[in-house]
Image (cartoon, rainbow, N blue to C red):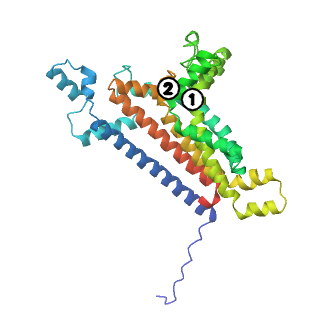
Amino acid sequence: MSLEPQLTAPPAPISPNKRIWGRRASAVAGFVATVFLTFLGLLAITFFIGRVIPIDPVLAVVGDRATNAVYEAARVQMGLDKPLVVQFFHYVVGVFTGDLGQSVSTGRSVAEDISRFFPATLEMATIGIIIGVVIGVPLGVIAASGQGSWVDQIIRVVGLLGYSMPAFWLGLVGLALFYARLRWVGGPGRLDIFYDGLVSPVTGLILIDSLLAGEFDIFWNAINHLILPASVLGFFSLAYIARMTRSFMLDQLNQEFVTTARVKGVPERVVIWRHAFNPIRVQLITVIGLSYAGLLEGSVMIETVFSWPGIGNYLTTALLNADMNAVLGSTLVIGAVFIFINKISDVLYRVLDPRAR
């Protein structure tokens, strides 16, 4: 037997590429786990709120004149006789399999209704956030660069009005002025009755579907109807984005590197838009993402005023009819969109800001 020491080879070093891919895999796994747990929490909140609300979903189905036997049979059929834990388990399984229940108001599945109504809300909110960003960001920058001037005061008043005016009142005033009085825009609804149903839904977004079908008359008619409600939504988004942009810019304009750039004779336009504005882009992504999610979930009053066939109008009708499946399904979808936009904002934050990676 040899007494010579056995030499073992040192472990092979881990390549930098493997380390990078390992970090990325763990980051993706953490992202998926966070989204899953957040969504599960949203499921729990919507489910138990639906059980706490003093609305009997069985009466909404059978009516208040049904006999006790009919009431109990419907209650058993809906699974409401089982313990809450079992009901929640069935609810979670149904949601993950795409079953949100049946709507009492429409007689269709809630998932089918949401796929019909949500694109209209998405379209209006998207145009609204575009208006808010395109106008709000420059206004915030102008207000900050001219702090204390009359332009700054006017922009701050506009922002204050955006925070203080009720959405339904501004929508009614807009209809009375621009539709009933001036005839500049279309009235309530998504299209004129003449064009309704002429375009087959592909994406659910009437602007895109009409272009795909080559129906340019319908496209411009949809624009005519969309511009006023989207502008009202965009005004509220504009006020928030302009206010936050002004606050971020004021902080940057007081930094030493901006003062140094001015001392070196850099043109003021370059100082503002390159030196001061570039660092706040990452912060603005979060602000814009939250504003967009807020438009998607806060368009209920606007859709009611403008008879807009979106998920907000659908949710209001469901509440009035005690249609709890539709209420819970709509709330769940809006909450899921909010989570999704928030997580996308976090991802973009890390992509644009190396310090957050």
Residue 117 horizontal/vertical position (percent): 48, 25
Q: Which residue is outermost to the top?
A: 194
Tell me the quarter of the image containing the C terminus: bottom right
Disc 1 to disc 2: CB gap under 8 Å: yes
User: Looking at this view, is 342 or 180 the one in front?
Assistant: 180
Give the structural element (helix, strand or loop) at label 1: helix
Rendered image quadrant of residue 200:
top right
Residue that carries the numbered disc 2 in the rendered image: 303
User: Looking at this view, is 291 or 328 the one in front?
Assistant: 291
* Mark 2 crowd level (few <14, some 14–19, many ≥20, 10 Å Cα): many
* Mark 1 crowd level (few <14, some 14–19, many ≥20, 10 Å Cα): many
Which three-letter amino acid code belongs to the residue tagged 1?
Met
Measured along the vertical axis of the image, is residue 134 above or below residue 304?
A: below
Q: Residue at x 57, y 50 (%)?
A: 347
User: Looking at this view, is 90 or 148 the one in front?
Assistant: 148
Residue 83 horizontal/vertical position (percent): 21, 40
Q: Which residue is outermost to the right?
A: 265
Rendered image quadrant of residue 65:
top left
Q: Residue at x 52, y 38 (%)?
A: 164
Residue 195 horizontal/vertical position (percent): 58, 12
Disc number for residue 124: 1
Which three-letter amino acid code belongs to the residue tagged 2?
Glu
Q: Which residue is outermost to the bottom?
A: 3
User: Looking at this view, is 127 or 229 the one in front?
Assistant: 229
Query: In the image, which is nearer the foreground, mark 1 or mark 2?
Result: 2
Measured along the vertical axis of the image, is residue 260 above or below residue 204?
A: below
Give the structural element (helix, strand or loop) at label 2: helix
Disc number for residue 247: none
Q: Is residue 116 visible?
A: no
Residue 49 horizontal/vertical position (percent): 32, 39
